[in-house]
Image (tube, rainbow, N blue to C red):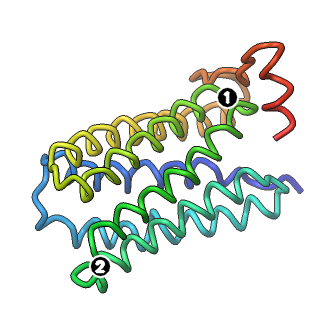
Amino acid sequence: MKLANPAPVGLFAFALTTWLLSLVNADFLSGASVPLILAMAFAFGGSIQIIVGVMEFVKGNTFGVAAFGGYGAFWWSFALFEEFFLRHVPASAVSWYLVVWAAFSITLWISSFAINWALNATLFAAWVTLLFLAAAPVFGDHTLTVLGGYGGLVTAVLAFYLATATLLNEIHGRTILAVGDRIKLSPVFDPLIRSL
């Protein structure tokens, strides 16, 4: 029995939730929109990605388990924090929260060199976005939040493209939208990346 590929719905969950939150961070939507984004974070960004992570476990995909399980937990923790704990947390703690998620994203990004260009670009944009957002509370500079919002929009569009490509390519049994091959860095770095 062939198992269905859960990755497209997980990628769409990541993309759409990131897209909505980034609209707030980039000042396209007001803070009054946050309750809608929290609902999206719980239901789609969080829960669906965790379910997809479990499905990737069944398929034996370690990267999928780490990425979808991790980002699903990120969205749950973000929504819980925003809803229940925001007022009692110092800015430096918020910054560190985002830094550790950036570190997680950097680890996935390095691992993605062995997968494809589209995933690698998405994860690169994700960790850069998180670092902009992490810097904002420390420096008290809203411009960094806005830059993080724009970075999040780039991340969301890249993830949406990857989700669409994965879905279309699998349904049609051929490449409709290219995602690129695994990245070959150099004779020196390529064996190192493959060993990770």
Quadrant placement of the N terminus = bottom right
In the image, 112 versus 100, the foreground residue is 100
**Residue 48, percent from left and from top:** 54, 66
SS type, badge 2: loop
Q: What residue occupies the far top of the structure in this picture? A: 187
Q: Is residue 114 left or right of residue 106?
A: right
**Residue 21, percent from left and from top:** 29, 56
Q: Residue at x 48, y 40 (%)?
A: 159
Q: Residue at x 33, y 45 (%)?
A: 132
Amino acid carrying label 1: it is: Asn
SS type, badge 1: loop
How packed mark 2 is, by other alpha carbons closer than 10 Å (few <14, some 14-19, many 20 or more), is: few
User: Between marks 1 and 2, how big is the CA–CA gap?
Assistant: 38 Å
How packed mark 1 is, by other alpha carbons closer than 10 Å (few <14, some 14-19, many 20 or more), is: some
Q: Taking 127 as reference, is 188 above or below it? A: above
Quadrant placement of the C terminus = top right
**Residue 153, percent from left and from top:** 32, 40
In the image, 23 versus 127, the foreground residue is 127
Identify the residue position indicated by label 1 in the image: 116
Q: Taking 153 as reference, is 14 above or below it? A: below
Amino acid carrying label 2: it is: Val
Identify the residue position indicated by label 2 in the image: 89
Q: Is residue 31 left or right of residue 86?
A: left
Q: Residue at x 24, y 68 (%)?
A: 36
